[in-house]
Image (spheres, rainbow, N blue to C red):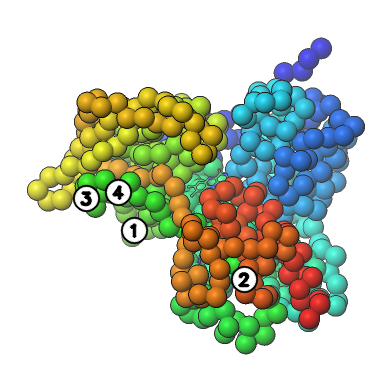
Amino acid sequence: MKKEPVKVKEVEISNRVNGFQEVVLGYSEEEALQEASRCLQCKDPVCISGCPVGIDIKKFIGQITDKDYKGGYFTIREKNNFPSMCGRICPAEYQCRKACILTKKGLAYASAEAINIHFLERFVGDYGMKDNLKAGGEKDQEFSKFKVAVVGSGPAGLCCAGELARKGIKVDIFEGLHKSGGVLRYGIPPFRLPRDVLDFEIDYLKELGVEIITNSIIGKAKTLDELFSEGYAAIFLGLGAGTPSFLGIPGENLCNVYSANEFLTRVNLMSAYKFPEFHTPVNVGKHIIVIGGGNTAMDSARVALRLQKMSGLEPDTTILYRRTEVEMPARRLEIEHAKEEGVKFRKLVKPEEFTGDELGFVKKIRCLECELGEPDSSGRRRPVEIKGSDFELDCDMSVIAIGLNANQILTKATPELKVDKYNDLVVDPQSMETSVKGVFAGGDIVGGEGTVIEAMGMAMKAAKGIIECITKK
Ligand code: FAD
């Protein structure tokens, strides 16, 4: 008899929006065993090809079935230093689950029948966290003479640091912000990625000997040449895509129109939602408009709605998107959660202008209706404006979440680093070495905005390139 997928437990919708506690509760042991028992244990598993870091998915699910959770944990750890984190935020429906044999070929994202690999990964990761399991490396005395600098402490930087430290290389991470984690801390809200999970996974790196130097912007505080002269044998750049895109429409500079980066950083990193405990509040509008259809837009809208609720306002947060839900790049789960929590969606809508009051605060947004035309270069159907379809919405706060571009602080200060037309770093695709000898890169600064696990996949490749480079010298 066909076994039904095991649904994951979630906090009651009515309780979610009152705070920032985690929404998805994960599998119990019984549920994990039931879900793992649906895995066909294929002779030639294709799910692995969908994982950018190549976790042996078949093996760790088999270990769950055998109740060998510790074994499962170490199987994942062979390829991924952050199982609890990835089990929570990986867009599995576009990656391993999409490749699962139970998803029929040709679907844009995983079918509901595909094994819930991410929830099983989370179960095993949390088991390891609860038992404080430590995956040692194969530290090699020969490597202890090398030290490598990593710039940026997002998933790319952390992953590269972990790979090198496991071998016994001394790694120092330089991070511009006052806390480590990159988007994991300043972008993704705690109700999706609790900070104790992030801290546990970062602490593991510290135990491996990785040092994290915060408040240190490379390109300003120090140059790459200075790092080399301090004895670093190689440098990895995980600079991310921290520069927001804007709409370029009138009124965008009005007060209370935020970029998603600023808004999420104020709330997640500066703890605006804990005001007055933290002295960094954020304005909260009565009618909030979020523009975009990706994860950043979903996170912004869900955060905005919570802030409205926590400020005693009637929640009124609306997402405007130029296309339809099919084309939305956000994780399906985040779209569902946003809807369940009360975020309104207006699709096929293009913002044209913000208008404000005499004090310069935004009050309204004027939009045009759209229809779908022919596919564009991304393969998604292009939104085509409908002339004369203008309409206005109340909007006393807006968050623009339409995309992110390369963080250029270091590349501008280092003209020898070759960049492409998007200002992303150009690298050798095999070694991930940049145009500067001994300097490697990975994550969103190479190839633009991607996913956490893609950033980690590139970082692992770079770590190999770095080891080859420094041992050849
Ligand atoms: P980042 O995470 O951006 O980290 C770069 C770090 O480098 C930052 O900490 C920055 O301060 C630091 N830095 C930059 N320049 C310097 C310098 N010169 N000196 C010192 N430090 C520097 N992906 C998913 O897989 N699942 C999701 O659910 C998901 N949700 C997302 C939600 C939001 C709001 C956003 C913005 C992105 C989301 N993503 C998600 C995408 C994912 O977070 C990124 O692909 C990933 O973080 C890229 O990792 P990175 O290490 O390259 O860069």
> Looking at the image, which is closer to me, 367 or 144?
367
**Pointer 4: what residue?**
248
Judge whether 389 appears above or below 259 on screen.
above
Q: CA distance from mark 2 to mark 3?
A: 41 Å
Q: CA distance from mark 4 to mark 1?
A: 28 Å
Residue at the image point whose x is 48% and y is 39% from the top: 294
Residue ranking furthest to the right: 43
Q: Residues within 10 Å of mark 4 (few under 14, many from 20)?
A: few
The amino acid type of the residue labelled 1 equals Thr
Amino acid type of the residue tagged 2 in the rendering: Ser
User: Is residue 46 toward the left or the right of residue 348 in the image?
Assistant: right
Identity, as a three-letter code, of the amino acid under mark 4: Gly
Crowding near pointer 1: few (<14 within 10 Å), some, many (20+)?
Answer: some
Look at mark 3 in the image and give the residue it sits on: 254
Quadrant of the drawing holding the N terminus: top right
Q: Mark 4: which secondary structure?
A: loop
Q: Residue at x 20, y 37 (%)?
A: 364
Q: Is residue 125 left or right of residue 196?
A: right
x%, y% of residue 446?
A: 58, 58
Residue, disc 1: 280
**Is mark 2 in CB contact (under 8 Å) with mark 4?**
no
User: Which of labels 2 and 4 is toward the front?
Assistant: 2
Q: In the image, is the residue at mark 3 within 8 Å of ligand 1 by its beta carbon?
A: no
**Precedes in sequence: disc 4 or disc 3:** 4
Nearer the observer: mark 2 or 1; the answer is: 2
Q: Which mark is residue 435?
A: 2
User: Disc 3 to disc 1, how far (Cα)?
Assistant: 20 Å
Tell which of 354 and 315 is nearer to you.
354
Q: Position of residue 463 (x, y in %)?
A: 73, 64
